[in-house]
Image (cartoon, helix red, strand yellow):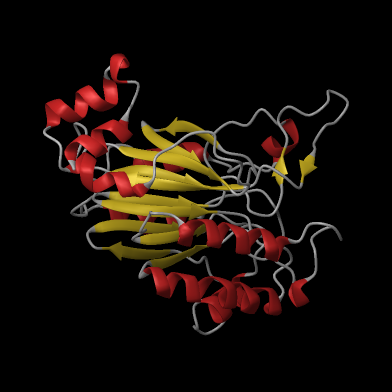
Amino acid sequence: MGQHPPASRVIAHLSDTHLLGEGRPLYGSVPVEDRLRVALERLEASSVAPDAVVFTGDLADIGEPDAYRRLRAAVEPVIRRMGAQLVWVMGNHDDREAYSSLLLDEEPSDRPQDRVHDIAGLRVISLDTTVPGYHHGELEPAQLEWLRGVLAEPAPLGSILALHHPPVPTPLEVMAVLELHRQDELAEVVRGTDVRAILGGHLHYSTHSTFAGIPVHVASATCYTLDLGADAGRLLSGVDGGQSFDLVHVYDEVVVSSTVPLATHPEATGFSSDYRPMIEGMDPDVRLEQLSSKSSHLNLNEAASSSG
């Protein structure tokens, strides 16, 4: 209804589920499976029809096999019903052998889990930034060369790079210790390529920046979040609240990332979807007058009765 045609592709971006085996709560108190269930219910009940659903790492909290089985049991039926493609990304809490065998049905492998997904012309590259035995991120020289080779030929709709450790600064000093190391080497590979956006996780709060001229969108966690406004006496504060996921709309010229909170609230105002056919059927000038003119007071009830 505006200047831009609908997005060519839509990605639902979730991160940091941190599931445990046997459905155990994280830290003994955070019901991570319930939080994931709510996120998936919100996504499926919405009007959004994602072409892909991307999970940017820390899928399991300590790499337990049962956690990956439970993750698949929760996620895959929803993905099938929505008709979307599913993209997993390795996180520092994940285990490569369990990840490759239990999520991807491949032989267990301790090699970096890098993969390319074709979302009807949009290339999504899942890049493994994990360092076995550590929580910070890094990319091996061989991975960078592999990525350089992938990006040598542009994709029809461009590329989205999905990784766990986002190449952006963080105001949380403790988290800065666990950042992606040697970011300059990644910048040298992606600068000037068809990479249109970088999706990340790891930080447990939503944030946005740029890297090598490319927009970076970090999704918050579905498990717990880090409170950037915590009391000054706290070096780090993780809370069971504020969880969210992102919706990434890929347009011809731009990529837009929007945050969807898991919590719902009482509606203060709005319009029923019943109004859509009436609005779409209006002449553009009439539509602008009804929806934009202050004198109309958005009186769509009168517009509906007069159009009938």
Q: Which quadrant of the structure image shows residue 3?
A: top left
Left-right relation of 271 to 102: left
Q: Say which quadrant the C terminus sits in.
A: top left
Determine the residue positioned at 37% across, 42% down: 197
- Place of residue 74 in the rendered image (x, y in percent of width and height, measured from the top left): 58, 73
Total numbered labels placed on residues in the image = 0
- Place of residue 281 in the rendered image (x, y in percent of width and height, measured from the top left): 15, 42
Closer to us: 103 or 138: 103
Q: Which quadrant of the structure image shows residue 207?
A: top right
Determine the residue positioned at 88% across, 26% down: 233
Determine the residue positioned at 64% across, 76% down: 70
Q: Which quadrant of the structure image shows residue 268?
A: top right
Q: Does the rendering let one see residue 109?
A: no
Q: Does the rendering let one see residue 64?
A: yes
Closer to us: 40 or 175: 40
Left-right relation of 14 to 23: left
- Place of residue 238 in the rendered image (x, y in percent of width and height, measured from the top left): 77, 43
- Place of residue 82 in the rendered image (x, y in percent of width and height, measured from the top left): 39, 68
Left-right relation of 93 to 253: right
Closer to us: 283 or 263: 283
Closer to us: 26 or 265: 265
Left-right relation of 228 to 74: right
